Amino acid sequence: MKAEIITIGDEILSGQTMNTNAAFIGDVLTRNHIDVTAATVVGDKEAPILEAFRKAFNKNDLVLVTGGLGPTHDDMTLDCIVKYFNTELVKSDEVLTDIKNIFEKRNRKITPSNEAQALGPKVADIIRNHKGTAPGTWIEKDEKIFISMPGVPFEMEEMMTGYVIPRITEEKLENKSNRISKSLLTTGIPESYIFERLGDMDELLQGSTMAFLPSQYGVRLRITVDGENSEDVQDKLSYIEQKIRTKVGQYIYGTENDTLEEVVGKLLSERDLRIAVAESCTGGLISSRITNVGGSSSYFERGVVTYSNAAKVEHLKIDEDMIEQYGAVSLEVSRLMAEGIKAVSGTDIGLAVTGIMGPGGATFNKPVGLVYIGFCDNKICTAREFRFGDGRILNKERTSQAALDMLRRSLLGIEYED
Amino acid sequence: MKAEIITIGDEILSGQTMNTNAAFIGDVLTRNHIDVTAATVVGDKEAPILEAFRKAFNKNDLVLVTGGLGPTHDDMTLDCIVKYFNTELVKSDEVLTDIKNIFEKRNRKITPSNEAQALGPKVADIIRNHKGTAPGTWIEKDEKIFISMPGVPFEMEEMMTGYVIPRITEEKLENKSNRISKSLLTTGIPESYIFERLGDMDELLQGSTMAFLPSQYGVRLRITVDGENSEDVQDKLSYIEQKIRTKVGQYIYGTENDTLEEVVGKLLSERDLRIAVAESCTGGLISSRITNVGGSSSYFERGVVTYSNAAKVEHLKIDEDMIEQYGAVSLEVSRLMAEGIKAVSGTDIGLAVTGIMGPGGATFNKPVGLVYIGFCDNKICTAREFRFGDGRILNKERTSQAALDMLRRSLLGIEYED
């Protein structure tokens, strides 16, 4: 089954909004063995929208459109669908009830422009919107499927996972190819180092493919395997994964869409350990990432963002003389911060960071990107130096990743190589 | 001048990586009066890459390609450029020196695969990479420009702003059209409410266009105006902006790419006020957003993430009986948290949030999405209730935005309407 994703909106072409929807849809389709052949973006004009519909629906079995379904004047997807499928708009009482319920729940009064959203093309099945007001549409023609969904990401996402994918699967339209993909997520090692360690790629992959996808959080290794049957592809994948793990296994913290905060959250839960975090340069990002995980209150006790020295002294009971002597950005202070937050909170683990994120704050000996991470558990207190690059927010993200990885290594008993 | 953006990578089609590069490039081009006619994504295969090059270079004056320039086997953009422009690869000593410097700075040893990146097409000018190893290329042919850049966002971004745009401007290839766009950023009011308040859109816009772009942070109103000359478009834009501000001005916190944390940071700096933050449900996100702004250490004193009740009692000196009586998620406790963090830190302002982010933690009276935000300055202590929707991370983001907006309103003396 071949699919094309069309995103509608001037705001996407002009970069005002990121095309997260195409990424989400591409991911869900790929996981369900549907080949994404192209992803195109068109502006809010009738002619290019209709042309994109025609081209995509001619070349593919499945077309998914997002955007242009809102309650305002610049939303023209519905009109284009009506024209393209030569149909008309009809009112849906079910959708009107859904819209009224949403406004009631938020203590807001409904507006006429929202009531007008209870319209759908006559030839379409309505996809109900459980998170917002604009419904989606599902149209079948010539054994092909044309789907439109709203551009608000969480509304579209719920429709994809709650309706679109189950219905495609149910109608047995999917074409289960003997292809699987798996991502191994590494952190703390550069792309080129992994490449060198893996050695001869042809020998490793034997006809399969692998992509190296770097970001500030690490390098994703995405392996794609084709084969005779599902057993064959599983065998090939296992072989490649095993080889990779032998060579860079200690840097692999998860697979697929795991986040490092989920991984360490699970490890803390399993071991029944509680953590507290003291942050300077990351400004709360590490605590925020840990608490992005549902249920984190069972292992995350507290965090402090001790930006000022006074806060370090008061909340972490650090001797002011030590800060004077070593400087707030130092190996010693990061260890004392970890020790302090552990003692004050009475947790099993204290994690702490201090560093220079830029653009200001650097000195001759302490450049932008210099970071110290401290770690204490019931056995040891330790600290490490890291050197990142430029970019304040990137450095915050890199530092939070390195700190969570230090926690992961400690929980799993994996020593650093150097 | 017409431009097309091509993004290369299976990982984009399959949604493993978001296409942030197309968004960034689209934004920069639009601001520089270059029309983006299309944005296309192709996979890591030679034939579709070459076809995309051909189509885009035929139809446009400028083609910008990102991705596929890394040090590993799946990076094939350079080979495709060599084929498309019928040229060859040559070594660049300048690039080799840049690569060596990067590795030295990070205390890492250089690998042979990195050294191989010091190659570029003979017909191209090299675009130096100041943030990474793969250089970009600039090729001119038939009075058109073909540019390729690495896929790592911050490397590409530096090349765009540091080299590509200045050179395009310098070569006076840009076609200054009499079109301007401006975004007004609102928060705290739904899209449909703004639409109703603005009334007759044709009367307001008089031939100009406006897009409503909602997200969890609010609704972006993007106005685009065409006209006879630059004075004419400025007049039209001012008229529309003024009309909008009259009707929903209190909800507008910024323009273009302003963030609310930058806006409140500027207000705090100007007024010489210092702030401290106590967070429960947002888990550090508010502190992290405030400290995303360079120089925030001059007004951000500290943050505490008091997830446990013990932390609320210890760090904020809240009477444990009050938490017992009203519950940790209550109007009263949010106000006490704001009062507590202000007193403990000795700042001018205390900001605090408590709420239920989901998926767990809800009770009959306290559903997921219920949030209380407390605020204290030297004159008053107050608190407000908010009701958001589902989705833990979305709720954290919405709550952080509402809290920063409460701060903005207070600093500007703007009362809530209800």
Image: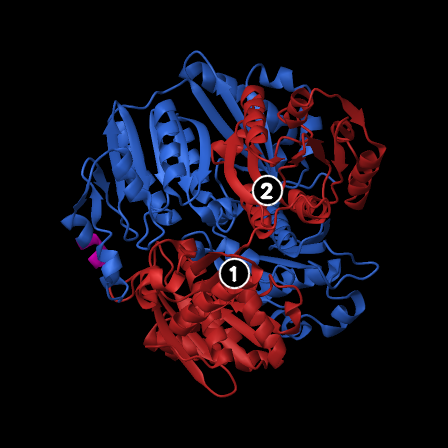
Chain colours: A red, B blue
Q: Which mark is residue A233?
A: 1
Give the main secondary structure, helix, strand or loop, of the magenta stretch. Answer: helix
Q: Is residue B124 magenta?
A: no
Q: Quadrant of residue A214?
A: bottom left
Position of B338 compared to A202: left or right? right
Image position of A140 with respect to B13: above or below: above
- Residue A19 shows up from this direction: no
Image position of A261 with respect to B406: above or below: below
Query: Tag 1, which chain?
Result: A
Q: Which of pointers 2 and 1 lies earlier in the amino acid sequence?
A: 2
Tell me the kind of residue under disc 2. Answer: Met
Range drawn in magenta: B97-101
Instruction: Give coordinates of residue B178: x percent, y percent.
Output: 42, 17
Residue under label 2: A1
Image position of B307 with respect to B45: above or below: below
Q: Quadrant of residue A417?
A: bottom left
